[in-house]
Image (cartoon, rainbow, N blue to C red):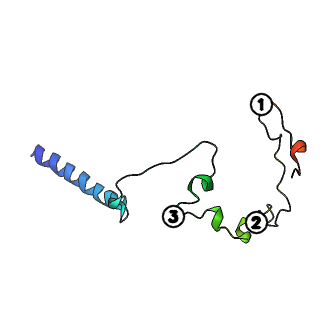
Amino acid sequence: MTRLKLFTSFGLAGSALLPLAAANAAPPGFDKIDTVVVIYAENRSFDNLYGGFPGANGLANVSADQARQLDRDGKPLTELPPAWGGLTGKGVTPVVTEAQSAHLA
């Protein structure tokens, strides 16, 4: 009788996990994926790495309205805000400050 109670408790515990497994099932089509390749490079933008991939919305496809940079109040910026603390990190030489690089052509 003890074994029957043990198997019953295992059966009940297992049946409680079935809805959880169904909820975490992979979406349709995932079974067709054989390999996932991760491409990354340090200090590269999304567009630099993936902008030309099929389905990627790279900068080549951006309209002027989408590329417009807005201030926090939603108004278009006439120029980009300053990079606080200069353009080089502490200890990097030669030091390039914001004032040295502002409005260079």
Answer whether residue 39 is visible to the viewer in this image: yes
Mark whose residue sits in front, 3 or 2: 3
Give the amino acid type for the residue marked by disc 2 in the picture: Arg
Q: Position of residue 100 (x, y in %)?
A: 89, 42
Nearer to the camera, 10 or 75: 75
- Secondary-structure class at tag 1: loop
Q: Which mark is residue 54?
A: 3
Q: Which residue carries the number 1 mark?
A: 92
Mark before the other along the chain sequence, 3 or 2: 3
Seen in the picture, residue 103 relative to 87 is either above or below; the reply is below
Q: Position of residue 1 (x, y in %)?
A: 9, 46
Give the amino acid type for the residue marked by disc 3 in the picture: Pro
Q: Position of residue 15 (x, y in %)?
A: 24, 57
Q: Residues within 10 Å of mark 3 (few under 14, many from 20)?
A: few
Residue at the outermost front position: 105
Left or right, 38 with respect to 41, comes to left
Left or right, 4 with respect to 12, comes to left
Q: Quadrant of residue 18?
A: bottom left
Seen in the picture, residue 63 relative to 35 is either above or below; the reply is below
Mark before the other along the chain sequence, 1 or 2: 2
Q: Which residue carries the number 2 mark?
A: 68
- Secondary-structure class at tag 3: loop
Give the amino acid type for the residue marked by disc 1 in the picture: Val
